Image: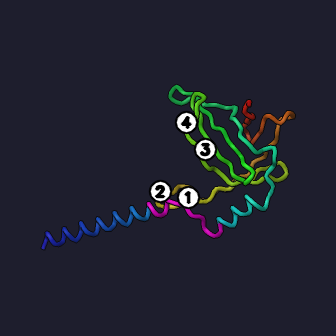
Amino acid sequence: MKSKHKSYVRFLISVGIIAFSLNNLLSCSGNKLTTKEAQIVETYIKAKNHDAAIIGEWIDNGTWEYKGTINKVNISFDEQGIKRERMYRDGKAFNDWHFIYYYYTDQGKIFMYRPAEKGFPAMDGEIFEKKEYHFSEDGKTLFLGDKSYSKPQN
């Protein structure tokens, strides 16, 4: 009788692990938007302004040191309303460009939206941010909140 009970418990644990793994795999792959999130994204990328002066890559003027390396995060805005980031260590790209927010601009403010993370390991709900921005007189420096970014030298 005891061996039958142990087999049954092992079977239930195995089914639980498989279900957990499938849920994790299916919910994280694709990261599908809810209907509400899709409507918000539509507003951010199609129904609002994307200031032409902000479009392009911007190099962070600030840096930080980590384990003997000098690090910074560059940002990029495109005309479709997507903001991306990329980290640099000692002047070399550390990773690929990755999605951060959908955005639009309006009267000196940038409105940014990131849908909620999906799946078991999700840590963030949807995020809305609003920051003031402006440019230097020559248009080569972007001031975004309390940070400043420069246009790369071509």
Q: Please state the horizontal and vertical placement of residue 149, each as a whole percent of the image.
A: 73, 36
How dense is the environment of label 4, judged by Cα within 10 Å: few (below 14), some, or many (20 and up)?
some
Of marks 2 and 3, the one in the foreground: 3
Task: Judge left or right: residue 148 versus residue 115.
Answer: right
Q: Nearer the viewer, mark 1 or mark 4?
A: 4
Please provide percent x and percent y for residue 58. Answer: 71, 38
Q: Nearer the viewer, residue 75 or 61?
A: 75
Callout 1: helix, strand or loop? loop
Instruction: Work out which residue is located at the far right of the displayed protein and give it.
Output: 137
Q: CA distance from mark 4 to mark 3?
A: 10 Å
Q: Nearer the viewer, mark 4 or mark 2?
A: 4
**Image: magenta residue range:** 25-36
Q: Which residue: 72% across, 48% down? A: 78
Q: Which numbered disc, 3 or 1, marks the residue closer to the eye? A: 3
Q: Does dot 4 land on a helix, a strand or a loop? A: loop
User: Dot 1, crowdedness within 10 Å: few (<14), some or many (≥20)?
Assistant: some
Please say if 123 is above or below 42. above
The first of marks 3 and 1 along the sequence is 3
Q: Mark 1 sits on what residue?
A: 117
How far across and how far down the image is residue 69, in percent? Answer: 54, 27
From the image, tell me which residue sits under label 3: 97
SS under mark 3? loop
Q: Amino acid at mark 1?
A: Glu
Precedes in sequence: disc 2 or disc 3: 3
Q: Marks 2 and 1, how far apart in space?
A: 8 Å
Q: Are discs 3 and 1 less than 8 Å apart at CB?
A: no
